[in-house]
Image (cartoon, rainbow, N blue to C red):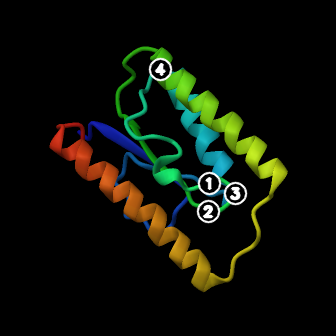
Amino acid sequence: MPRSIILTNNKSIALRPTDVLISSPNMLAVLETARDYVHLGHHLLTHPLAGSVKPNENPCRSLVLTCDRLGVDPQSVQLIEGCLSLARRMLKERPLSSFPPSVLADLELIDRSLLETGVESLRLAGHF
């Protein structure tokens, strides 16, 4: 059984049966789903805003949480709530543009690369 769950709205990522593809192109939906998982006791294993990619620059977002409910983790709660607040504020100040397919493919690649880097670190630590 996997030790982690990937939450993403990036259709270019190969997912396992336990992973979750969020159908919304809005990255806030990914962060909100992650928040819900965290409040149920899953822990964040990757940073919700990894790679310093601003929420108003890339609609694609992927992150990793523990597969099991390990009890509410105050650090995960604080991190996801802070990132969600920041993302909402940034998107209110400067909403995302619509992107042509070629640019969206590049943005998906950036998100996928950040996820792969995080997954590799987790694999080395035995979490993936």
Q: Quick check: 123 left or right of 117?
A: left
Report x, y in % for residue 96.
75, 62
Q: CA distance from mark 3 to mark 4?
A: 24 Å
In the image, what residue occupies the spot 69% across and 76% down?
99
Residue 42 position by quadrant: top left
Residue 124 position by quadrant: top left
**Label 3 sits on what residue type?**
Asn
Q: Where does label 3 land, which residue?
A: 56
Mark 2 burial class by Cα count in 10 Å: few <14, some 14-19, many 20+: many
Report x, y in % for residue 90.
74, 48
Whichever of callouts 3 and 4 sits on the residue coming sooner in the sequence is: 3
Whichever of callouts 1 and 4 sits on the residue coming sooner in the sequence is: 1
Which quarter shows the C terminus? top left
Q: Where does label 2 land, which residue?
A: 58
Q: CA distance from mark 2 to mark 4?
A: 25 Å
**Label 2 sits on what residue type?**
Asn
Q: Where does label 1 land, which residue?
A: 54
Residue 102 is marked as: none
Q: Secondary structure at mark 4?
A: helix
Q: CA distance from mark 3 to mark 2?
A: 6 Å
Residue 75 is marked as: 4
Q: CA distance from mark 1 to mark 4?
A: 21 Å
Q: Quick check: 112 left or right of 48?
A: left
In the image, what residue occupies the spot 61% across and 36% down?
83
Mark 1 burial class by Cα count in 10 Å: few <14, some 14-19, many 20+: some
In the image, what residue occupies the spot 45% across and 71% down?
109
Q: Quick check: 16 left or right of 49?
A: left
* Nearer the camera: disc 1 or disc 2: 1
Q: Secondary structure at mark 2?
A: loop
Mark 3 burial class by Cα count in 10 Å: few <14, some 14-19, many 20+: some
**Label 1 sits on what residue type?**
Lys
> Is 27 situated above or below 69?
below
